[in-house]
Amino acid sequence: MLAILFMSFEIVDELRFLSSANSDNVHWTLSQAEVEFLEFQNAVDRARMADDPPPNLDEVIIEFDVFYSRLATLGTGLLYSPLREWSQFRTPLLDARERLENMIPLIDGPRTELAAALPDMATELTEIRPLIRKMATTGLEFFAFESDASRTSVAVTLSRVALLTIGLLMALAALLFHARRVTRKSQDRERELAASNARLHTIVGTSLDGVIVSDLDGKIIDFSPSAEKIFQRSAEDVKGKRLGEIIVPEYRRAEHEENLRRLRETGNHEMLRKGRLKLDSLRADGEIFPTEYSVAKASAGDEDLLVVFLRDISHRVAAENELVQARDRALAGEKAKAEFLAMMTHEIRTPLNGVLGNLSLLEDTKLSLPQSRYVRNMKISGELLMRHVNDVLDIARFESGADTAQEQAVHIGHMIQDIVDSQVSNAQSRGNVLQWGWTGEPAGWLRLDASRLQQVLLNLIGNAIKFTRDGRVTIEAELQREGGGLALELRVIDTGAGIPEADQKRIFEDFQTVERAVGESIGGTGLGLGIVRRFVRAMKGEIGVESDPGEGSVFWLRLPVTAADDMRPALASEIEPEAADDRQLDILLAEDNDINLELAREVLERMGQTVTTARNGQQAVDAAAKRHFDLILMDIRMPVLDGLAATREIRAGDGPCRETPIVAFSANVLPEARDRFAAAGMSDFLGKPLQTTELRQVIARLSKKHRAMAPAAEPVPAPAPAPDPVAVQPTPAPAPTPAPQAAAEHDRDSVIALLGRRHLEETEELFDWLAACPDDLGAVADRAHKIAGSAAAFGQQRLRDALVALEKAAETGDPDAVAPAISRARAAWETAPAPCVG
Amino acid sequence: MIHSSFRLLTAAALTALAMASSVKAEELPAPEGTVLLTISGDIENTNGDGIAEFDIDMLRAIGETEITTETIWTPGTKVFKGVPLSTLLEYVGADGENIDATAINDYSITIPMSDAVPTGPIIAYEMDGELMSRRDKGPLWVIYPFSSSSEYRTEVIYSRSIWQLDRLAIK
């Protein structure tokens, strides 16, 4: 383009040169010079020839001047300077001019002299003539040459013009081509744009979400059909109106306007980044309903737009609410069910405890051989039933969340040893060898939830023994380092029947039992492993089984643990629970029911404990104020001062028993009741009637805890020497043979018989008194309560229940309700079995 | 085209002006020195038998102007002084379309009246402050302002630049 432009300028310049003629008609000038020369010569000749003087000299002078002027022009004019370059022209011109100059004195001189000189002048002129001729011909020659050059130059210019034209045409063609391409492109783009617009329109039009477009002032520009449906407004009506007035509920309008203002000022708003928002919107009929929407900013040309996508979620919100309610109801139902289950289980356990307690006592009486067998069978069944009930209770407590994990430092080796010891006889009874050992380095003190782990291990070992006969049960323990932490892996390996692969998964589910083909009845609720799995998971561990049917099974569990080396000195005494068992404790027993009191005293004394009794709460408080006891067993319901009040009093005072463990002694084992006991300051709980094993466990637990709490004070006047921590290290523990059973030298029979007789007498006495229809209903309630306690202890459950009913009826103060209760109690008394405590 | 029509208009206007200003023919003063220029033809104002004759003083009196220009016939830039043709024609009340200009040696050309515009040609009598002699293209020379416009640098204009002028005839 530049080249073309440059060329154009050059050509225009050239044309201008051609149009502005620099040359006058030079030919004319040259021939004119010749003509004027001849005129001058003629004038001279005429003047010379004139016969009558004076000759016409004026003409000569004028013609001279004219000719002179012409030569001067040729000699100095710009126009002729190229011509003058030629010597063929310049030389004659200079010669001629010089000759003319020489004539000037004559011309300007006196006329007479001029007249006289005319002949000479004529001669001179004949000499000048060929010079002028020469100039004319040379000039012609020059201008022929010049015009040739000029023609060539014109031709060149014209061909350049042609070239330029071609160039221009090509440029035009290129331009045309380019223009067409651009046009086509823009047409394509237009088509594409139209298509994509149509698509977009279809998308927006058919989208289920409402789409609203507004400017930054909130003025609605577009309102999609879905938006029309959601807001029940037509697009025509709302276009141009303000967003806030159309879709924003009044209570949110100020906030909405503020948002728009901030958006306008800053060009940005967190609203744009938040993604999906949930906010209320307003329908045409004034209904406020939840919407979910997102806001985006778009630029159309130089105008900013807001695009709002929104969706009516009122159905979804309603459904969600319904779901939440349904879930809450279901959860509440679950909880109620769990609580109910727990309560029922307690209710079952209480009488079951009665059965088992009495069986224990019965075993110690003189029995015939078949009787002992029956008793033993009953006891086995009863214990099995108790285990099932305990299983269910464990799960119910776990599910209702009453049970929480409690980590403590334990010596893991000793713990396993204890468990193994407790199961040795069980294993032997099925001809099994039970043993345990460490794989790798033995571990010492670890921090973990000991009671749960104990239960898990007991369960697994119990199962292994149960499913193995004349075989071997081995427990392997291994401490593993995992990442930065420690893990304890325990494997319970048996050589029993094994579990088919198909069953391996479901055995950890609740209520799953494995059918045995062998006709060997192995009872169970199917809850044991379910509990185990719950506990392991609660301890953040894992559990699994590997088994080959016929070869045996391996139950493994892995728990994260932490080392607890710092605990070692403080808890050194913990490692030998048997030591505590041997200690003779000084026990205060508070119980208002004589029979229960005697029964409990009997059990405790047989264990070798020293027992002091109190008949009500006040007596217990008084006794506790006088001297120190190692343990206080406290009935809850007692006259004068009940067990809870007595406990609070002892705890609140500064007597010697302020720190003594106080164990609730009650038939009520509901969790809420236990919470109440704990709140009053009680340390533990024992069910009624007293079971020796439970009592032993509680005593062991409390004396441990008590010593751990105040190891330095050690106020227990224990006759048995404290065990030497060094000596009790990993020595094999003695078999846990229950001492009381082994040493039952005491003359129990006489005592029990005595108590039984006394119970009979008292009961007889009560009914005689009742027959007289006493007016004092308070006394009726008290006496009924007292005998009810003895009846429970002597296995007369129906009598006990009837007396409790009577007690309640008497407490209402309604004589009409008391009479039938008395007759029902009498009927129960008449059919009651003989008191048997064992 | 625009120029030529403009010139026509100008000429017409000037003619009308001249006619208006000289409804009655005026007697021009007679020349006292050597007569340099004789105007004949369609003129209103005369000082002889249908002619107007001018000496140098009369020409100077009508109105002087200067043109500084190069010419193709002289070396370098020259300053010419003279009377504008338009002024002169108005002065004599010329009424015609063409002016026949003739030189001492009877060389003759035709100048259209339309050339006679105020910024146009002058009848020059001085070059570089000196009266021009007959020997040097004097005493009168029609000078166009060649340097002012390329319109004045054409062969036609060059041919109209007549020197050794002594007669004008208005037709």
Image: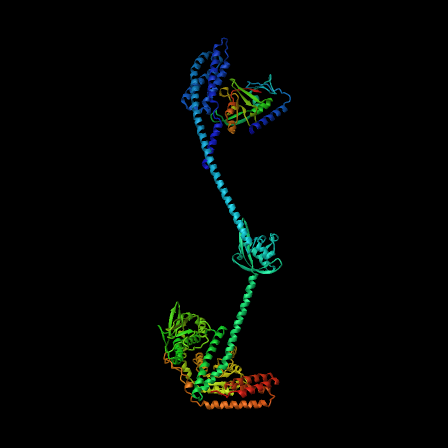
Residue A663 appears in the rendering: no
Instruction: Specify how the rendered protein is coloured.
Output: rainbow
Q: In the image shown, does B135 or A576 lie closer to the viewer?
A: A576
Q: In this view, does B71 lie above or below A423?
A: above
- Percent position of residue A40, x then y: 48, 15
Residue found at the very far left of the displayed protein: A440
- Percent position of residue A639, x then y: 55, 85
- Percent position of residue A616, x then y: 53, 86
- In the shown orientation, is residue A47 left or right of residue B39? left
Instruction: Count every numbered label the image shows and give the total.
Output: 0
Residue A521 image-quadrant placement = bottom left
Q: In this view, does A538 lie above or below A124?
A: below
Residue found at the very far top of the displayed protein: A51
Q: In this view, does A305 lie above or below A381?
A: above
- Percent position of residue A333, x then y: 53, 71
- In the shown orientation, is residue A770 left or right of residue A35? right
Residue found at the very far right of the displayed protein: B24
Q: In the image shown, does A810 or A800 lie closer to the viewer?
A: A800
Q: Is residue A798 above or below residue A328?
A: below
Q: In the image shown, does A662 or A550 lie closer to the viewer?
A: A550
Residue A62 appears in the rendering: yes
Q: Residue at x 49, y 18 (%)?
A: A66
Residue A829 image-quadrant placement = bottom right
